Structures are given as structure tokens and as C-alpha cells.
Amino acid sequence: MHRLLTLLLLLAGVLPGQDFFPIEQVQAGQRGVGRTVFSGTEVEEFDVEILGVLKNFSGPKTSVIFARLEGGPLVDTGVLAGMSGSPVYIDGRLAGAVAFMYPFSTEPLAGIRPIGEMVRDVPSESQAGATPLEAWREIAGLPRRRPEEPGERSRRFQPIATPVALGGFSERTLDVFRDEFRRLGLQPIQGAGGAVEVEAGQPPVPGSMISVGLIRGDMDFSASGTVTHVQGDTVFALGHRFLSAGTTEMPMMQAAVMALVPNLNSSFKLSGTGPLIGKVTLDREAGIAGQLGPGPSMVPCTIRLRQSGGQPADYSMELVRDAQLTPFLLQIALFSSISVSERSLGPLTVRVRGGVEFKHGLPRLVLDDIYTGSGGVGQVAALSTAVPLAYLLETGHAGLEIDSIDVEIEAEPADRYTDLVRGWLSHEEVRPGETVEIRIAAKQPDGSERTHSVPYDVPASLSAGPVRVTIGDAFTANLQRWRGLFAGRKVRDAASTIRFLNSLRGSDQAYLRVWRRKRSLWLHSDHLNSPPASLRAVLSTTSGRAAGALDALSTTIEDRKIEGFGGVVRGRLSLQFVVTGS
């Protein structure tokens, strides 16, 4: 009942007993006091000089208070990453939260988010776009979004970077994901993700540190910031977005500052996490809000590493339960696990076996494949394993609730490519009902060449005319399906989407497709090779297309896998035979 009352008060834009300094009364020359933690858990004060108010700062009816911060270590450090949310008071009343800065500024100039905007109900913004989803643009043949140049960021007032502590991750993880972290407004710090001594039972107060957990367990991924305002069991913090997750649930913990680290670009607080105190429930442009009490439901994740000549390792952790964040966090955890064994130079083969279990009787999402090469194999394996889950969760189908994730990784310092080099047919003219031998020469990982023979029985009902044969790798076999999805084909429900993803081809086999240039139809995830004329007429209408029907320019006669290859198959061969009259 209390939580419902708090929500209703938030929607009304007012909290009981609040005493805020109105933005309309803020003027240049006023003096104020800020509160934050510089060491341990002790909240200390610093001076604030108001320089003015910037109207319509990030949209209509939004403002930011421009100020100079003074006192304590700020003369040496400037505005610190981790100060986001530090409350600022004018005449003893809360005016807002320190939230913005200029990178490379020679003095501690800051932007203060008015408290009225932080507690006011604002429609949650669109998702920031987690990293795995960018991969779909490349799979579809589209360019990635243009990255922001470093100079562009340094010339504008921007949200203070949120320091992210990573514990249990490899050093290479920070190097590989650094740009993605920064794109999301995060400042990664390695080795600072451990627990610290924080007196349990102490409720957060304005100016105290909190930590928002994304991964907890053998790997720890948490972000720190400052509490702005506490009303009952509702906590407001940061003063700017964290990840633009909208309505969400993330662990909220106490935190303590271990040291201040001066930096020419952005100084930061080095902090560690303390006891769990509740959960963040809202992440929007004006800051985050959370509830004190029990923590959120998390996704259990187990990663088992098996490496040639090395000791096996098992990692257990919990990931935030979020459609955008869970796949991204899985990708990071997988890469860190692989990079422990991955060679900096030379060949590597990584085999992934695992899956995602769902509640409500949904089928298991299978995450099995093999990756090989002489560089970047860990990145490819981690991204490719996380992308199917990212796509599935992005669909927004009802009932998608992850129960657990388990992945086993085998790493071997060897190149396991098998190249398709030649293909030929025993006959180029055949009659219906006859058999044609399809032969494939493949170069094995050891350099030897092996011939595979695949008998194909021509259907007795097949009409006369040319028939095309494609023998290709997994990318070739899956490309048509992906193109159909990106062209707008719909999948009916969560179970159908999982079955579609599980039907995608693995990289250690070749795939034979016998087909003709003849129109067919896709309906959701089903390929209708020879639909009746009446059904085609219905599905070709506007309503049929809206229901998920899509034209295809070819008809598949037979589709099968070819086994017996010793590694990752690559290449594509095209052949043709002619069916003569019976």
C-alpha cells in the first residue's frame, strides 16, 4: 500500500513534506552547499556558486543550473565521476543534483539538474541500445551507426560519466569493450568491483554513495553514484540517465569510496560495493529512482571453461533481468571467460555448447556453435552466442522470462577451418526418379583434401527444367532467413521464434540446397514452397502481408546438412543440372 501511495504521489509530481528550492528563483550570484562522499561513507559538504540557468537544456521545459564547485579536493580533481546525484541546497532547500560537466575543463564547472525534474513523472525514453543489437545491422548488410568523435563530446556539456567497477574480468575485456562502455556514458575501472566494509542497517541519506549492480557473483559489474533525495522508501539519484532502461529492476547497494583518482579528462571516485538495500526501478533522462527493501529477481548464469592443457574453471553469477542488458552482459562475461585462455597471437578454436532455459513451458534456446581463426575469435564467439538471445528478447513476445543460462566453452590453440574448394555432378541431365551424385572437394584443417559424395534422388513428380544446387557454409544457409526477417517477416510468438533460432545452421557442417527460380511464400517463420493458388491469393493481399506473409523469389526442393567435416566450414559452391522429360 505504501509503494502504491508513493507511485501516485510521483505521478502527481509532488511528494509529501518536500521542501524544494524552485528553479524559477535560482539566480546568478547565489551561494549554495553540496553534499557528497570523498572518503569511506562520510558525507561531506562543498561550496557551490550559481553562475546562471540554462533554459530548455535537453528539451522543452527542461533546465540546468550552471555552477562552480569549490572546497575540499575539488580544486585538484575537478568534478568527479561518481558525484552524479550529489544534492545541492540553496538557503537550506534542495535545488537539484550535480549531473553535468565539461570534459577537460580546468576548473570544477558543473550542471545541476533541478530536483523538480527528477521527481516529476516523465515518459521514459527509448532504450539506449545495448551492444549486441548493433550486430544485427551488420548481419542485415546495413552500416553501423556513426560513432561520436571524441572532440564532439569535449565541446558540449554532458552527463558526468558513471564509474563502473569490474571485478573478476580480464584486462582484455576492458580494452575490447571500452568504447561501448563510453558510448553508454560509463567509465570502466578494473579490479574495483569487490565488496567493502559498510555498516549494515544504515539507510542511505542525501549525499551518500550507492552502487547499481549489473552482474553479481564470480564476476562483478557495478556502477556507483550519489543519492540526491530520499522520501520514505523511495530513493532518487544520479540526476541523469544511467542506461535509459526505463522501467527496470537492478540491485541497489550501499557503497564506499576507497580513493579519489585525479585525471585530466575526468577524475573519478574509486569505490566498492556494500550490502544490498533494495532495487532501482526507474532509469530515465532525469535520473534513477529505486525502492528500499528486497532486491530484484536476477538471471542465474553458469559458464564452464574447458581449455586444452589447462585447468577447467567454473564461473557462477547473476545477471540483471532486462531485455536490452541481459544479452550485453552475457556477451561481456563470455568474452572475459574466453580471453583468459585466448592467445594474443596465433590460431584459436572455440566451441560453445549451452542454452537458455525459460519459464512458462517455452522451449530451450540452444546456443551451440564453433568459431576459429587467427585473431578476434573470442569477440566473435561471445557476440555470436549472445545475439540470438538479444534478438529473441527484442521481439517483445509475451511470456519471455529467463529461468537460467548455462554455457560450456572449449578452447583449443588450433585453426579448424575446412574450405569448400570444388563441386561437380555425376550427371548434368537427369530424368525424374533418377539419382545424381553431388561431389564436394574440401580442404581439411591439416591441408589434405577430402571428397564428400552426396546422392540426391530427383523427385518423380519434378517437372522438366533447370535445377540449381548450392553447397555452402552456415552463413550462406542462414542468409536467406535473416534477409526475410529484416524485410519485415514476422514470427508468431515466443515459442515459434525460439524454434526458428534453433533451426539456424551450425558452422561445423555444410548445407545442400536444391532449388528453382520460382515464387514461393514465407508465412511467419514457415517457408511455403508451393502454396495453393487460393492461399497465395489471400496472403498476397494487404491484410495477408500485415499478418506476416512475404514473397520469396525461389522455391526450395530439398534442404539438408552434410556432416563429416573437421572444423568450421567456409565457402559456397553453385552447380546446376537439367531435368529432362520423363
Image (tube, rainbow, N blue to C red):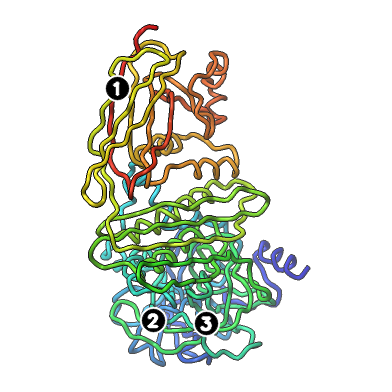
Give whichever of discs 1 and 2 has the lower sequence position: 2
User: Residue 436's x, y, as percent?
Assistant: 34, 22
- The answer to whether residue 33 of the structure is visible from this angle is no
User: Residue 327's x, y, as percent?
Assistant: 48, 58
Q: Which residue is drawn at 23% across and 52% down?
A: 446
Which residue corresponds to mark 3? 273
User: Residue 302's x, y, as percent?
Assistant: 52, 66
| For residue 280, side relative to residue 470 (left or right) | right
Q: What element carries label 2?
A: strand
Mark 1 Cα-neighbour bin, 10 Å: few <14, some 14–19, many ≥20: some
Separation (CA) of disc 3 from disc 1? 64 Å
Q: Is residue 87 above or below residue 302?
A: below
Q: Which of 243 and 489 is in front in this view?
A: 489
Q: Nearer the viewer, residue 507 or 441?
A: 441
**Residue type at tag 1:** Gln
Q: Residue at x 65, y 54 (%)?
A: 359
